[in-house]
Amino acid sequence: MRQALLAGLSGLAATALDVAVLASLMERGCPVALAAWLGAAAGAAASFLLSRRLAFRDTSPLGWPQIARFATVAASSAAVMALAMHVTSTIFGVPYLLAKAGCAVAVFVLWTLPAQRRFVFVAPTSGAPVELVSARRSSPLAGRLAHRLVGRAEPRPSASASSLSAV
């Protein structure tokens, strides 16, 4: 729940930056398409950095593969959002701002957050979310607890493995 809340707050902060850049550029006479693109780019960068560090506690070195995965999720989220907005606003006649709010929550909960959790912010070797790998490294007990909290049981070391490590 903490991760979802922080990812949501990161998204809200990124949206605020997006709108601030858009409005600022528009006030200075920038063409709307360029202002919208620059605002969206600033918001996406902020979302990536905030989500990476705060929500997913990813302290691994920043790399192009992770940025590409994030861009893929962001682009697919935009496509799903556009379709959802079309259906709710155009077909069902929901006012566009209300449709935007409802669709944003639905797309975030059903697609964006799970995709970021399982595809973008994963430890490269195990496929486990970065937060779980970090907990596992800090202590075996924390790793088992973290896995149990997300519904995955961490295997306990066998008696033979623990007796070998004691030798």
Image: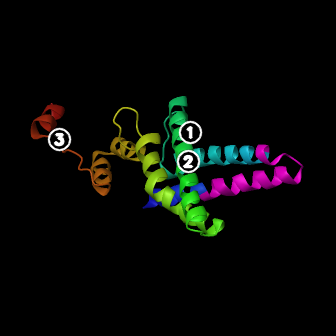
**Type of the residue with mark 2:** Ala
**Type of the residue with mark 3:** Pro
- Pick whichever of labels 2 and 1 is earlier in the sequence: 1
Spatial CA span between label 3 and label 1:
38 Å
- Which residues make up the magenta segment? 12-34
- Pick whichever of labels 3 and 1 is earlier in the sequence: 1
Q: Residues within 10 Å of mark 2 (few under 14, many from 20)?
A: few
The answer to whether residue 25 of the structure is visible from this angle is: yes
Residue at image location 31% in from the left, 57% down from the top:
149
Mark drawn on residue 157: 3
Q: Is residue 160 magenta?
A: no
Mark drawn on residue 79: 2
Instruction: Give the quadrant of the N terminus.
Output: bottom left
Q: Secondary structure at mark 2?
A: helix
Which x, y percent locates residue 159? 10, 40
Residue under circle 1?
71
Numbered disc in front, either 3 or 1: 1
Q: Is residue 30 magenta?
A: yes
Residue at image location 18% in from the left, 33% down from the top:
165
